Image (cartoon, helix red, strand yellow):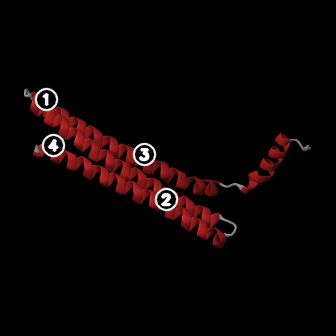
Amino acid sequence: MFKNTPFEAIAKTMSESAPKFNATSIQDAVKPVQENLKAWADLAQHQAKEVQAVIAETMASIKDVKDPQAAFEIMKASAEAGMAMFAQNLKEVTSLSVGQFHSTVDAVEKAHPAPEAFAPVAKNLKAAATTVETTLDSVMEKGAAAVASASKAKKAR
């Protein structure tokens, strides 16, 4: 019935493999993907609410202001709050990404035909991801400190 063409070879493999699939194993395989997507959706929703709150607060603060200098100060404070929120959001995104990367590496190690051989590679991959996260956190903290320092220096003048 089957010849040796690529399409027929795929069809044969699928027809032979079909009875081996069951709904429980498919759900188990899809569950981590669903959990990862839900974590990203929850994070995005949380961050969007924070942005909306900051914008609403800024608009309420500036609504009745008549003095241009006061309006400038409100906008400046809003920009500083926005930068702080951006840094926090980036930290949260990085943390989620690294956590999911670690979970993926753990899953690959668990499913690997020779997990003991893959273990050192997994350890190095996870260490590299953690180093990237730590470095990014450090850079963001230094950047925030530099902005705060510059802002304080301008106020002192």
Residue where numbered disc 3 is placed:
41
Kindly report the distance in space between the C-alpha atoms of the residues bearing marks 2 and 3: 22 Å
Q: Earlier in the sequence, mark 2 or mark 3?
A: 3
Residue where numbered disc 2 is placed:
129
Residue at the location (31% across, 54% down)?
A: 141
> Mark 4, mark 3: which one is toward the viewer?
4
Which quarter of the image is occupied by the C terminus?
top left
Q: Secondary structure at mark 1?
A: loop
- Horizontal and vertical percent for residue 89? 35, 48
Q: Earlier in the sequence, mark 2 or mark 4?
A: 2
**Image side of residue 12 versus residue 22, left or right:** right
Residue at the location (29% across, 40% down)?
A: 51
Total marks shown come to: 4
Q: Quadrant of residue 23?
A: bottom right
Q: Earlier in the sequence, mark 3 or mark 1?
A: 3
Q: Residues within 10 Å of mark 3 (few under 14, many from 20)?
A: few
Kindly report the distance in space between the C-alpha atoms of the residues bearing marks 2 and 4: 38 Å
> Mark 2, mark 3: which one is toward the viewer?
2
Q: Earlier in the sequence, mark 4 or mark 3?
A: 3
Q: Secondary structure at mark 4?
A: helix
- Residue type beneath disc 1: Lys
